[in-house]
Image (tube, rainbow, N blue to C red):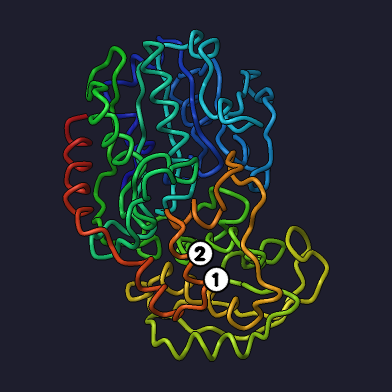
Amino acid sequence: MHVGLDRLPELPQLQRLRSTRLGVLAHPASVDRELTHIAFVLERLGVRPRLFFGPEHGYGGEAQDMATVMSSVDARSRAPVVSLYGDRFEDLSPSAADLAKIDVLLIDLADVGARYYTFVWTALLALRAAHAAGVHVVVLDRPNPLGGAAESVEGATQAPGFLSFVGLEPVPIRHSLTVGELVALFARREGIPLGDVACGLQVVAVEGHRRGVLASGWDRPFVFPSPNMPTAETALVYPGGCLLEGTNLSEGRGTTRPFEIVGAPWLDGRDLAARLASTALPGFVARPLTFRPTFQKHAGKICGGVQIHVTDPRAFRPVATYVALIAFACRQQPEQFRFRTERYEYVDTIPAFDLLTGSAAARLAIAAGEDPLAIALEVSRADPAWPEVMREAQAAVAAC
């Protein structure tokens, strides 16, 4: 398998990159098959970027979730490193002043296949701003670690009024597309030229990779793209595990297995595991445990809960599993459980759980005590129109 960065030395665009004013949007997982970071790959190829951009968590990947990232300077090249994750929604896009310094923007961001993982939306916002400024964009694509099969899609697209930085456009929770495919899809719909070397979009597609292959089947290591996405196993559970951010349950941040470990000081893990087993949802075992997070929710407190062990990655349905888990936790301790009401990803007026699931329906059903399995199956039901959208996205990349 050759990702976009692997293919860069053989591409006709290389000579232009050597002679143009270049910006690079990247993060720690922007590496080639030898695990060399894009900054060093470009240096080796005689390409010297004028500035770098970093998404959420930062160009170096040091920042925790939703932590403001400050701009800085690259220690090796002394080029500016511009943060695209600040205090305001406007900070998520490159400024006109920064875009005036470059002619081409090279984007290389690893994604994990869930709508609410923000890197794809940073890429789309960067494309929109670049196009408006007359800057050409090249996306170096990477495979989806959850695979690209249509039958793996989970969840409907968001209801009207529920778009946000954890879903800027209507997309299922588990979408089975790549960053390049999603960006090309919306570029085509918005009239941004595909394949245009002036101010349009080009996508350097992955070569030698079958869509159905998960990260466990890659011929290269999984490199963690953010602090709480350490392994490919984390990515498997994340489309469900991220829903915990909309509740007062710990999603395992501050432990060595974030998103796999779930709990709270008042939760009975054995009861929760038994209830999850009763659903007969496939591909996992919920193991009761206790843990003490070192930071974030319930830091320093002993929590009861479960660890989700995925036993069959292809059968496992993370969205259904975690929606059921959350509903059972609420049913077990309704006086202790609550949904998050604090500001979440630049939104003050809509509960985080609604932004993540794409509507208020699941939250209201859980609060009303409706059947957890029925709620889980409804939230995870795949959008029947999405396979056609996937074909549209793949065709857009082919046109690049």
Q: State the quadrant of the C terminus.
A: top left
In the depicted structure, whether residue 159 falls above or below residue 49: below
C-alpha separation, residue under disc 1 versus residue under disc 2: 6 Å
Residue 31 visible to the viewer: no
Q: Position of residue 117 (x, y in %)?
A: 48, 48
Residue 4 visible to the viewer: yes
Q: Position of residue 220 (x, y in %)?
A: 41, 55
Task: Tally the numbered discs.
Answer: 2
In the depicted structure, whether residue 59 falls above or below residue 191: below
Residue at image location 26% in from the left, 52% down from the top: 209
Dot 1 and dot 2 residues touching (CB under 8 Å): yes
From the viewer's perspective, tell me whether residue 385 is left or right of residue 377.
left
From the viewer's perspective, tell me whether residue 210 is left or right of residue 35.
left
Residue 367 disc label: 1
Q: Position of residue 182 (x, y in %)?
A: 32, 41
**Location of residue 254 by image quarter:** bottom right
Residue at image location 67% in from the left, 25% down from the top: 71
Closest to the observer, 307 or 107: 307
Density class for disc 1 (Cα within 10 Å; few <14, some 14-19, many ≥20) is some
Q: Amino acid at mark 2?
A: Arg
Q: Which residue is mark 2?
A: 363
Residue at image location 64% in from the left, 85% down from the top: 269
Residue 30 disc label: none
From the viewer's perspective, tell me whether residue 54 is left or right of residue 121.
right
- Report helix, strand or loop for mark 2: helix
What is the residue that sits farthest to the front in this orientation?
368
Q: Amino acid at mark 1?
A: Ala
In the depicted structure, whether residue 369 falls above or below residue 295: below
From the viewer's perspective, tell me whether residue 340 is left or right of residue 275.
right
- Report helix, strand or loop for mark 1: helix
